[in-house]
Every structure is written in C-alpha cells, then in structure tokens.
Image (tube, rainbow, N blue to C red):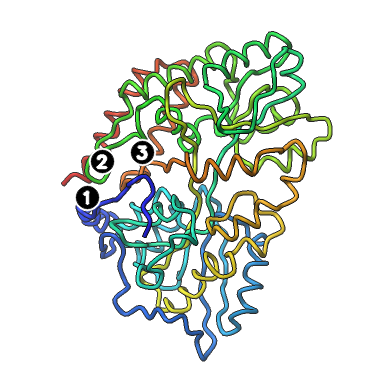
Amino acid sequence: MHFHNGVRRSTVALAAFALAGAALTGCSSAAAGGGSDDLSTDFTDPDKPVTITYSGAAYAADAVQPILDAFHEAHPNITVEYESVPFADFNSALATRLGNQDSSLDVFDVDMPRTDAYAARGWLTDITAAFPDLEGAIDPASIDAAMVDEKLLAMPYQTSTNIMYYNKALLEAAGIEAPSADPADRLTWEEVEQMARQAQAAGARYGLLFDQIDRYYQLQPLPVSAGGGVGATGEGNLTPEVNNDGWVDAFSWYGSLFEEGISPRGITANETPALFQSGQVAFYVGGPWWADGFNGEAGLDYGVAAFPAFEGGEAATPTGGWSVGINPASEKKEAALIFLKFMGLDNGGYAQYLENVPVPPANLEGAAAYWQKPTFEDPRMDGAVELMQYELDNTATLRVQTVGYVEFEDIIGKTFSDIINGADAKAALDSANQQLVDAWEKYQQ
C-alpha cells in the first residue's frame, strides 16, 4: 500500500476509543476494522439472487441510478437497493444502524475524515485481503484516507481539489494583470490580499472570498502553509495543536479579511458561489464543481489560478472525498465486495456511468476521463486540468486523521465562525484547543 505524506495511524488510541465507543453505542467494537475472518475474496458472483442495501449521502438517488443500472447489467444476480440520506442526517443515521449491528445495512458511504472514528467503533470491515495493492489504480491521498494501521477499511471512489477563480473584468478595471494557471507561478495570500484591495478600490464589491467560508475542509491549508500543521499531533493525532503560531498567524490574517470588508460577513457557504457568479467578487477560492454554473453565465469573464500559499510557506490544497465501506454485521459481504470493486476499480470505476461528475474520481483511470468533460473545454477554464492534476499529485493535504475528528470538525467550525464575526484569533484558538483537550480526554484512557 502507498502511504501519502508518511501518515500511518495506530490502533493504540483506536483500541482505547473502541471501548468507549462500545459503551456509547451498545455495540461490540473492534479497532481498525472487523468482520473479515470469513470473508471470501475471489469476487465470484452468487448463483442465486442477492439484494444488498447501500446507504449514501454523496449522491441523490436519481444521480446514482445510472451506476446501479450498469452494475445490475454486469452482475444480474446482485441487486443494490440505494437509500439516499441527507448529509446533515447521515452520521446520526449510520450511528444508529451500525451501533445496533443492523445486518440489513450492507454497504455505506464513508466521509473520508471519519474513517478512524468508524474503525474505532468497529463499523468497518477490513478489506485489505480483497484489495492488497491499490497503488497505481487509486489516488494516493484517497488510499491513505481509507486506511488505519496499514489496513484498508473502505474503497475510495471520489476525491477533490480546489482552485482560485478570478473575475477578469474586475481585475482589468483595477489595472491588475490576470494571474497564471501555472502552479509554478502560484500567488501568495499576501499578494492576493493586495490585489483584492485594489479591485475593491476600482469597484468590486468584495475582493476575496472562500466558497466554504467557515469549514475546515477548505481552510485547513491556511495553517498548514503558515507552518502550523493540520491541527493535531501525537499518538493517534490526539494532541490538539490549533493555537500554535502558524494557526494564530493564519487565522489572524483570515479574520482581518472580514474585519476590513474584503470578505463579507453574514453569509453562509451555500450563498458564496452566487456572489462570484453575479460578478461581485474579484477572487473566489473554490472547487471545480462550481465551474458548470459559472460557465452558464455568458457575461461572466473569469479565469483560474492556483490555490495560493503564504509567503515563505509551503503550498497546500484541500482534498478528500468519499469511500464506500462494508458493515461488519452484513451477511452479504461477498456480494458487497463485488460492488466495492465495481465502484472503485472496474474499468475506471463509477464515474464512467455519470454524465455530470462534479469532482475527480479517486480512480486514476476514471480521473483521466473526468479531465475530458465539457466543463474544461470552456476557454475560461484554460489551464485548470493541468493545475488540478498537479495539486492532486503534489500539494493535496488530508484533513487531520483522528478518532476525534467529529468533535474536531464541530469545535473548529464554530471557532472559524467566531473569528469571522470579530473574535480575536488567538483567544478563539486557545479556547478551541482547550475544548479539544477536554473532548478528547475519553480517548486517552
């Protein structure tokens, strides 16, 4: 197996959490995956009809149907019944079913940062024997995100990256030269801030805006680039470090964008793309999933550039997506394995059956087809393909991998909101660090 950025996670902390998780959920947990002792890995289709249940949050039911239709054609004796669950309700729904060892659930979407927490509760089947070497077939960062203690616990099928869009008209009005899409010419955040001010002075409503304005997924690269790391260190990444100099510097800068009106307060992540699409923002940091909407706006003249880095700091970009795992309580694991192989590996994986794939597949062959989609034929997206391929290969930074991720994401998200609304970055991050110490105490036993 390939390990990206040298990240390897230990079952020491996971085992401790498994005991706590069992008490909380009423399940019999096994650290770093379970339920694989009697798992057949020869991928032989069943002789008689089998129905497996798939619970997902990444795609709505109508979006998944072409995938299921193709699977049923290839494997007529296996029927997949898909249950679409809204993301906001997904984790609680999984906790109920997996915690109660509900055997009616066979496979389910795994939000990559939550792999460790699911593993600690014994909610994921160890599938290493079935897929002993994904290197060369799957994006390396996605493999890492699906592994705990050198065990593969889910099949990655979707990854992600970010770029920076810019409004050519607003930059031209301010006398600013359009930036390059070449990552070798990556701007610094300090340069972008200065240009954002110039654009505002020339008429732009806002100078710079992040699409996921208060979410760790997109903001994590800021402290990483500033030298502060991903937010936790130590055994099992259970020692929080969100108040070191890098974090404080990064979010003092980020908070100043809102304090000075370069970025807007009082909006949600769902509202940010419309501001760029309507021509109100000079620089917009976001995912390629917004490009189709931007391309549909004939009057929007934009271009793309690399996700910036702080002066003197390393380049870091958001990444991560979805995997699919097998419930250890499932009585249909062999059929489930065939479905996992289909989703992640067969002929490039799931994405070949979808007309609109908003993010790159984790499968490298499937990603090659993704780069050919009509979105990237629009001249406004010139250079985007090469840029995103570079970022996925060189700067992709996984979110912190820890059994305490659920608490981490909640606490840090609220802290970011406080900083946006005027809280002192150091005080807010000091408070967040202590909250994490307290929240993670149960994992240290």
Residue carrying label 1 = 13
Q: Position of residue 17 (x, y in %)?
A: 24, 52
Residue carrying label 3 = 408
Judge by depth and name the residue closer to the eye, 409 or 32. Answer: 32
Judge by depth and name the residue closer to the eye, 156 or 270. Answer: 156
The residue shown at (22%, 50%) is 13
- Which mark is first along the chain, 1 or 2? 1
Picture quarter containing residue 262? top right
Vertical comparison of 216 with 13: above or below: above
What's the amino acid at mark 2?
Leu
Q: Secondary structure at mark 1?
A: helix
Task: Please identify, in this view, whether the residue under mark 3 or under mark 1 is nearer the observer.
Answer: 1
Picture quarter containing residue 330? bottom left
What's the amino acid at mark 1?
Ala
Distance from the alpha carbon under mark 2 to that under mark 1: 8 Å
What's the amino acid at mark 3?
Phe
Q: Are marks 3 and 1 in contact (CB under 8 Å)?
A: no
- Which labelled disc corresponds to residue 238? 2
Q: Position of residue 387 (x, y in %)?
A: 60, 39
The residue shown at (65%, 63%) is 352
Q: Are marks 2 and 1 in contact (CB under 8 Å)?
A: yes
- Which mark is first along the chain, 1 or 3? 1
Q: Secondary structure at mark 3?
A: helix
- Which labelled disc corresponds to residue 312? none
